[in-house]
Amino acid sequence: MSASAFETVSVIGLGYIGLPTAAMFASRKIKVIGVDVNPRVVDIINRGEIHIVEPDLDIAVHAAVTEGYLRAVTAPEPADAFMIAVPTPFKGEDHQPDLSYIEAASRAVAPVLRPGNLVVLESTSPVGATEQMAAWLAEARPDLTFPQTHGEASDIRIAHCPERVLPGKVMQELILNDRVIGGLTPACSEQARTLYKAFVTGDCVITNARTAEMAKLTENSFRDVNIAFANELSMICDKLDIDVWELISLSNRHPRVNILQPGPGVGGHCIAVDPWFIVSSAPKQAKLIRTAREVNDSKPQWVLEKVRAAIGACLLANPDKTAADVTLAVYGLTFKPDIDDLRESPALAIVHQVAQAHEGQIQVVEPNLTSLTLNWPNLQLVGPESVTGADIHVMLVDHHSFRNLPKPSGAAIDTRGTWRG
């Protein structure tokens, strides 16, 4: 089968991964039906506009809609291939995977499936999720055959192909990065590889579905463990009065050492979530991965303690002031620099807790947002030039526009090393 055999592709979920993927197929002159349950998102895309911040995505979507290769709807329609790119959060304090979005998408797609269709799960998922998706589809369509019962002779092909892109560089990395493709059978894998080769110039490496699922979780868990090491170092160095950024820079001069940078915690839908999927699958064996998650999850609380201590020090130094008179300036809310994505953001969690506990004014500097999702009367969204009278400055996200800001007067809590010069 050639890529041209896929005349119509349906992308279920038009978020940070689904919409760029839809735009990429449309740019190759393949008709794309984008599906999202949010009517507002559908309306925005059908106007040729976008609802998220991602460089070059607006141009690609506008061209795809204008040329008639992309349209958005709220319910699935028949297509040759279906790509499911919906959220996969965890639930509860025990961090169990929540597959309800995948189940809902599967049951929505099932009525329009036809023999010869391919269904690809793109959502980062716990091991076994692709098989579970296939089971839901088979339950909804007993008139069709599926790989788990009919192997290579099945009516429907099923595969998993996790995204592995960096927010802010999605449009380039979708094309250039290698892809891991895991089908429920070799024929499923080959058909999925043919589909992705419509725009992927990197290698499309074939494996089975479970290994493909585990590959994505492993990649993000590796990064999480490395970040946890850096975050733990930052807390140790603070106690020992050592500049952690200088320490890491010196240590990284070793030819086989590459320590990442510490921060206020770990956010985003991937690194903050995916390791828990491994822990939930093998809780007795995943000791290091669990510990790394706990270290990174504890870092926002450590930052909060620093903020509380700074407020206390300010009041001691200024006996005439009350807590309501202490103004904070907080820099950054998103989970990483230069994007508008707030998912699992430790900075957002920190500001939320500070706003709950602190009576004084909090000036929030976040150039990638036009409004605040936190509804607290003492919060004010301002530009860097509008920060005035702040007693304490808290750097949480090192956006590019912050990197040339002079070190402020007054107390500074720098979780990113932005002001260390």
Image (cartoon, rainbow, N blue to C red):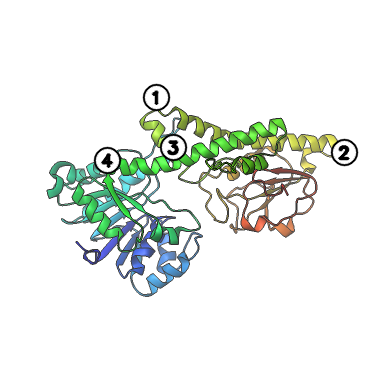
Residue closer to the observer: 271 or 105: 271
Give the CA distance from mark 1 to mark 4. Answer: 23 Å
| Residue on which disc 2 sits | 320
Q: Quadrant of residue 277?
A: top left
**Quick one: which residue is furthest to the right in this view?**
320
Q: Name which residue lies at 57% across and 50% down.
A: 334
Circle 2 SS class: loop
Up-down relation of residue 20 to residue 135 (above or below) = below
Callout 3–callout 1 Cβ contact below 8 Å: no
Q: Tell me which numbered mark, 2 or 1, is placed earlier along the sequence.
A: 1
Q: How crowded is mark 3: few (under 14 residues within 10 Å), some or many (20 or more)?
A: many
| Residue on which disc 3 sits | 275
User: In the rendered view, does 157 fall on the left or right side of 225?
Assistant: left
- Amino acid on which disc 4 is placed: Gln
Up-down relation of residue 367 to residue 142 (above or below) = below
| Residue on which disc 4 sits | 132
Callout 4–callout 2 Cβ contact below 8 Å: no
Q: Name which residue lies at 50% across and 36% down.
A: 225
Q: How many labels does the image show?
A: 4
Give the CA distance from mark 4 to mark 2. Answer: 63 Å
Q: Tell me which numbered mark, 1 or 4, is placed earlier along the sequence.
A: 4
Residue 214 placed where, x, y %? 35, 40
- Amino acid on which disc 2 is placed: Asp
Quarter of the image for the N terminus: give it.
bottom left
Circle 4 SS class: helix
Residue closer to the observer: 351 or 296: 296
Residue 272 in sight: no
Give the CA distance from mark 3 to mark 1. Answer: 14 Å
User: In the rendered view, does 370 fall on the left or right side of 163?
Assistant: right
Q: Name which residue lies at 69% across and 45% down.
A: 394
Q: Tell me which numbered mark, 3 or 2, is placed earlier along the sequence.
A: 3
